[in-house]
Image: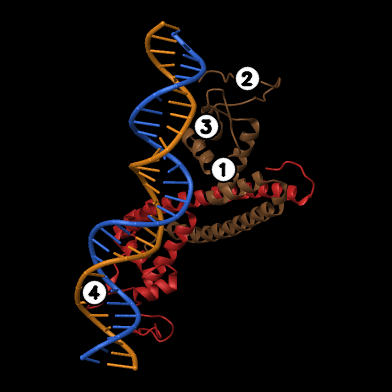
Chain colours: A brown, B red, C orange, D blue
DNA sequence: TAAAACGTTGGAGTGCACTCGAAGCAAGTA
DNA sequence: TACTTGCTTCGAGTGCACTCCAACGTTTTA
């Protein structure tokens, strides 16, 4: 892989663009997945070199970071695509986007509550196993 | 469906056994899923009527409740089956079971942290949408 | 310059967790 | 008795989110 070497722009740290394998390394996604994201409309338009290879920008990286967060929320890919489409559609979709995010936020809160609930059950079970006498725990 | 009518045992509330559709109604799982659980080894032995129909006990219901909690943790079904096998194997697997549960517990905690992290990102995004001026939010 | 590494595409395949269908008994109801 | 409902099994189908393949072109390294 060598030192990342491409057309640099700014003087410090910021890169003009990244190849697909560089982005894969940075995001933890595979190149396959990155192409698939583009195919399904989850990426804004990605630049190409004169020979047609993808050149990801800093902005693309930022977007992928956010998409990664959305993925961690458990949001379905289809909904992320919807969100991406709203972004592409322009400023008049701001309200819709905010709503989508707020719905997601509520879902996340609900999921956290749910998990804390399971945690309580797990703790009870585990404490039963702690007492080394032979009840009939399931 | 009528009133649940089967061989009752105790005087108040507790039932001797339940048909598959009763259990489906009680758990929210489908009859298909219940049979599938049994096929893959996720259920302890379920009693049958003289005609071969399943008769779920209170104990089975309790087990299904616990399995439901495990499912909510995000534990893969294969691991739940492993746990079920350990329970069937007898008392000498207690340590192993406790470890499995503790691993699950750690996973749940990690997931909660992860979700709280995404929550922070969502809140920042949402607050950007709140200010109704045209930046370029993604 | 030659070899190795990396990039492209469309389409097919994978693994998970269900989910459903078909064909055929069995039990309760009008 | 006829009908409706529910149960059985096996096997196939679904939806999601990737994941991989083949065949070929490009770029970097020795």
Checking the image for residue A7, the label placed there is 2
On screen, B53 above or below D12?
below
Q: Between disc 1 and disc 3, whose residue precedes? A: 3
Q: CA distance from mark 2 to mark 1?
A: 26 Å
Identify the residue shown where x is 62% and y is 39%: A63
- Mark on residue A42? 1
The chain letter for the residue carrying disc 2 is A
Q: Nearer the viewer, residue D22 or B60?
A: D22
Residue hosting label 4: B52
Distance between the alpha carbons at the discs numbered 1 and 3: 16 Å
Quadrant assignment, res B43: bottom left
- Separation of residues labelled 3 and 4 (CA atoms): 55 Å
Chain to which the residue tagged by mark 4 belongs = B
- Vertical side of B57 occupied by C14: above or below: above
Query: Between B16 and D25, which is closer to the camera in this rendering?
Result: D25
Front residue of D19 and B113: D19
The answer to whether any part of residue A82 appears in the image is yes
Q: Which residue is mark 3?
A: A24
In percent of the image, x 56 and y 18: which residue is there? A3
1 and 4 marks on the same chain: no
Crowdedness of circle 4 by 10 Å Cα count: few (<14), some, many (20+)? few
Q: Please rate how many residues cluster around mark 3, counting C-alpha atoms within 10 Å: few if below 14, some from 14 to 19, many from 20.
A: some
Q: What is the x, y in percent for residue A64? A: 59, 38
């Amino acid at each position: 892989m060598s030192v990342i070497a491409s057309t640099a722009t700014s003087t410090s740290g910021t890169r003009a663009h990244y190849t697909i394998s560089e982005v894969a390394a940075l995001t933890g996604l595979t190149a396959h997945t990155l192409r698939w994201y583009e195919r399904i409309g989850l990426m804004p338009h990605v630049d190409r070199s004169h020979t047609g290879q993808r050149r990801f920008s800093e902005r693309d990286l930022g977007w992928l970071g956010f998409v990664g967060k959305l993925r961690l929320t458990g949001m379905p890919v289809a909904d992320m695509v919807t969100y991406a489409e709203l972004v592409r559609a322009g400023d008049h979709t701001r309200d819709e986007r905010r709503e989508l995010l707020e719905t997601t936020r509520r879902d996340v809160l609900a999921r956290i509550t749910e998990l804390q609930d399971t945690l309580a059950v797990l703790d009870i079970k585990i404490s039963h196993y702690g007492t080394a006498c032979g009840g009939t725990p399931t």
